[in-house]
Amino acid sequence: MTDSATSPAVPAPIRMTALGGIPAINTGDDLAGLIHTAADAAGLDLGEGILVVCQKIISKAEGRTLALADVEPRAEALRIAEEDGKDPRHVEIVLGESVRVVRRGRGVMICETSHGLVCANAGVDLSNTPGRDIAVLLPVDSDASAARLRDGLAALGHTDLAVVVSDTFGRPWREGLVDVCIGSAGIAPIADIRGSQDWMGRELQVTTMATVDQLAAAAGLLMIKDAGIPAVWIQGVPRVGEGKLEDLLRKPEEDLFR
Amino acid sequence: MTDSATSPAVPAPIRMTALGGIPAINTGDDLAGLIHTAADAAGLDLGEGILVVCQKIISKAEGRTLALADVEPRAEALRIAEEDGKDPRHVEIVLGESVRVVRRGRGVMICETSHGLVCANAGVDLSNTPGRDIAVLLPVDSDASAARLRDGLAALGHTDLAVVVSDTFGRPWREGLVDVCIGSAGIAPIADIRGSQDWMGRELQVTTMATVDQLAAAAGLLMIKDAGIPAVWIQGVPRVGEGKLEDLLRKPEEDLFR
């Protein structure tokens, strides 16, 4: 038995740094530039690592918002809103973002989005800006959003970053929310990393971990305080490969819960 | 608007440190002592923070293992094993740990355990020790396990630690596994922390985050390399309150997916 088998290398610590100082985002804002400026002001040189960015600022920058006042609810939205005590304009937007309602009950709509994500309200959040209620929709293609942000940051000198877009989802069976990945660039969403042998040389089953979901959840520990931390820089997580959101989503025909 | 409203305090970085050097665990082992010794050898003084410990070493220390050779499968286990191509002794143990099979299909059994956890195979893992195949069951009461470990560490001078017991679960709709909490001590599992106001002074909905699940997932980023990292020390996450696993589990009558 080699030394490395008896005493495996301990991975280096992981450091997670909250990025504050990013202003309220409006359509067309240059997110990469704002993140670069905020990091600079905080004395952070965003080198190697993974930048986890919350979906809301990406959606806002991309103009994925709708004023509720501009929405005309149709019959199905009116019916559901009546039954569930909701704003019919919100329900109309949720239905528009859904390819299928997976479950409805207890005032909750669990929807499958065009991306294949399954989540409450198809990921449509209401933002109660005084005088103007808006809905914030998921990005059309979060992998592409992540890639654009990654390219923008690289052009500003941050050439060794992966980007994970996170959103806050509920889960079946468990209370409370966790942050999950809804798109990424520069990192494989899934990794076969609990390998072929354990450290005693015995065979282990191959286990695929949802690395990007673990990253999103980890970053969520720093996004909890208020709405002022829309991005977290994670250093020390080895990343390999590339991939796409589809890798992270179970095929409907292989799923036991829809 | 006050300064603190325009420029909220940025939380301090979070640091996560892998704890290696913990030997293979056997029934009756003193986990607190082994963790203390391993930390000491690594030059780590486990001060303030949260220690995330994987379920497997706790179960092994508590003797929650069964040799497959000692298990006599009954008719239901034989039938399921035949249909799904499994070891009937494994299925027998899984059924024994389950109050209900929530779904069975595609060779997978999703079970509700006596704790109220919903997971594959009721959390029963097979460990292929040469010459002796054993099943590792979940602790009988993971909150109590966490509390015992926390007390043991406190007695060794580590008086400012919370303990989270983690296990690796699959999820509906998403590929890959993530680590979640199955028991804790010294920390509230759920926190109402996305608060009453956002940083622009606008009202936000109260959002309950599953803090302990985010901690387990974060620690999982360091447990991925091999089986040699059964514990991760997380510094810098504010923790409040106490609670119990029940707080983290949705009541069956409020769940849309069982």
Image (cartoon, coloured by chain):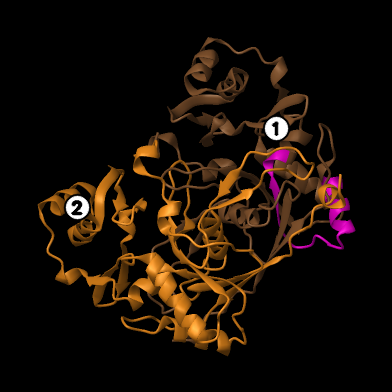
Chain colours: A orange, B brown
Residue B143 place in picture, x, y as percent: 66, 41
Which of the numbered marks, if any, corresponds to residue A81? Answer: 2
| Residue closer to the observer: A223 or A8 | A8
The amino acid type of the residue labelled 2 equals: Ala
Q: Tell whether position B45 is magenta.
A: yes
Q: Residue at x 68, y 57 (%)?
A: B222
What residue is disc 1 on? B127
Q: Residue at x 10, y 52 (%)?
A: A75
Give the residue at the far left of this rendering.
A75
| Residue closer to the observer: A164 or B238 | A164
Disc 2 crowd rating (10 Å Cα; few below 14, some 14-19, many 20+) is: some
| Residue B228 in view in this figure | yes
Q: Residue at x 24, y 77 (%)?
A: A131
Query: Which residues make up the magenta segment?
Result: B32-56
Q: Quadrant of residue B159?
A: bottom right
SS type, badge 2? helix
